[in-house]
């Protein structure tokens, strides 16, 4: 049974039991039946066969495209991303728990979405594993192709070194995660959007790259190195932002987490 079906089934069973109790057709209390049902599921999960830890080596060819849009949907585990794929590849690496790929050439752009396969319900008992296998992705990305990069990560640890990549557009949506991010060093202009939930994000702007930083956190904290990016008119701005050859514009929004830019 897939993980996405687990809670809907639990809610449906609980609703049926309460309905039967209200109609007087259920012997005993609905809560008693729910607890019994939960214990049965727990016992079955402990008996569920688990495979040995393993990772899948895989890659996505560039297919001659002049640019690319890469979306990574990684809900749990650890993620490493850096420059280093071969010239004819968009991305290559090791995928703990496997990978589902959606590859769509669109004109001269290659649109690619990589996600973890649907997890069976036994994984709900052991978060962070795919039937025993660590959900760790270790990826290398082509350094010479202009790239739009979107990351949707959940309860994960992320190390994203984009310094050697030509990322022109970066979107990060995080849950309860920890992220170390190094922004591109020579990509020209890069647009960055960070949506942080209960997350900790530490972003480093490489030396020689100018930045404009806007936004803030709800009840969380935003810390910016004001020696590099002085605060003026409600935003943080490098003195040479208007003339810099390489610069990033960062929009930050979030809740109870923390974001640091230095």
Image (cartoon, rainbow, N blue to C red):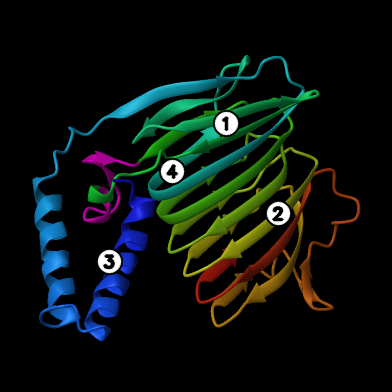
Q: Residue at x 48, y 55 (%)?
A: 179
Q: CA distance from mark 1 to mark 3?
A: 34 Å
Question: Residue under circle 3?
Answer: 13
Within 10 angstroms of label 1, few (less than 14), some, or many (20 or more) residues?
few
Position of 66 with respect to 207 (left or right) is right
Q: Earlier in the sequence, mark 2 or mark 1?
A: 1
Question: How many neighbours does mark 3 have within 10 angstroms: few (below 14), some (14-19), or many (20 or more)?
Answer: some
State the residue position of label 2. Answer: 192
Q: Is residue 70 above or below residue 173?
A: above
Q: Nearer the viewer, mark 1 or mark 3?
A: 3
Relative to the observer, which residue lies in front, 194 or 99? 99
Say the numbered circle drawn on residue 79.
4
Q: Are marks 4 and 1 in contact (CB under 8 Å)?
A: no
Measure the alpha-carbon separation of dots 4 and 1. 19 Å
Q: Nearer the viewer, mark 2 or mark 3?
A: 3
Q: Earlier in the sequence, mark 2 or mark 3?
A: 3
At mark 2, the secondary structure is strand
Expressed as whole percent of the image width and height from the top left, the position of residue 160 reads 52, 45
Viewer-nearest of labels 2 and 1?
1
**Res. 96 image quadrant:** top left
In the image, is residue 201 above or below residue 189? Answer: below
Q: Name the secondary structure under disc 1.
A: strand
Residue annotated with mark 1: 102
- Of marks 4 and 3, the one in the foreground: 3
Contact check, label 2 and label 3, Cβ < 8 Å: no
Label 2 environment density (alpha carbons within 10 Å; few <14, some 14–19, many ≥20): many
User: What residue range appears in magenta?
Assistant: 123-135
**Are the residues flagged by discs 4 and 3 in contact, CB closer than 8 Å?**
no
Does the stretch in magenta take in 169? no
Residue at the spot 26% in from the left edge and 30% down from the top edge = 54
Comparing 82 with 18, the one in front is 18
Residues at marks 1 and 3 touching, judged by CB atoms closer than 8 Å: no
């Amino acid at each position: 049974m897939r993980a996405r079906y687990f809670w809907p089934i639990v809610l449906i069973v609980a609703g049926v039991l309460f309905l039967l109790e209200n109609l007087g057709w259920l012997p005993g209390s609905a809560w008693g039946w729910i607890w019994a049902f939960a214990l049965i599921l727990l016992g079955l999960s402990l008996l569920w066969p688990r495979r040995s830890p393993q990772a899948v080596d895989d890659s996505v060819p560039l297919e001659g495209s002049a640019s690319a849009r890469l979306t990574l949907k990684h809900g749990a585990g650890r993620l490493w991303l850096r420059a280093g794929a071969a010239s004819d590849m968009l991305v290559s690496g090791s995928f703990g728990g496997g990978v589902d790929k959606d590859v769509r050439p669109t004109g001269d752009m290659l649109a690619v979405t990589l996600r973890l396969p649907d997890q069976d319900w036994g994984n709900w008992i052991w978060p962070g594993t795919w039937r025993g296998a660590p959900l760790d992705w270790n990826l290398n990305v082509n350094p010479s192709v202009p790239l739009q990069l979107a990351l949707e990560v959940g309860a994960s640890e992320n190390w994203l070194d984009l310094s050697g990549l030509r990322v022109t557009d970066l979107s990060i949506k995080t849950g309860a995660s920890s992220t170390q991010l190094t922004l591109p060093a020579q990509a020209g202009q890069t647009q960055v959007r960070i949506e942080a939930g209960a997350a900790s994000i530490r972003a480093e702007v490489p030396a020689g790259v100018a930045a404009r930083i806007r936004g803030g956190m709800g009840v969380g904290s935003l810390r910016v190195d004001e020696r590099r990016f002085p605060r003026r008119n409600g935003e943080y701005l490098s003195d040479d932002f208007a003339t810099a050859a390489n610069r990033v514009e960062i929009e930050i929004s979030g809740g109870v987490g923390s974001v640091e830019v230095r």
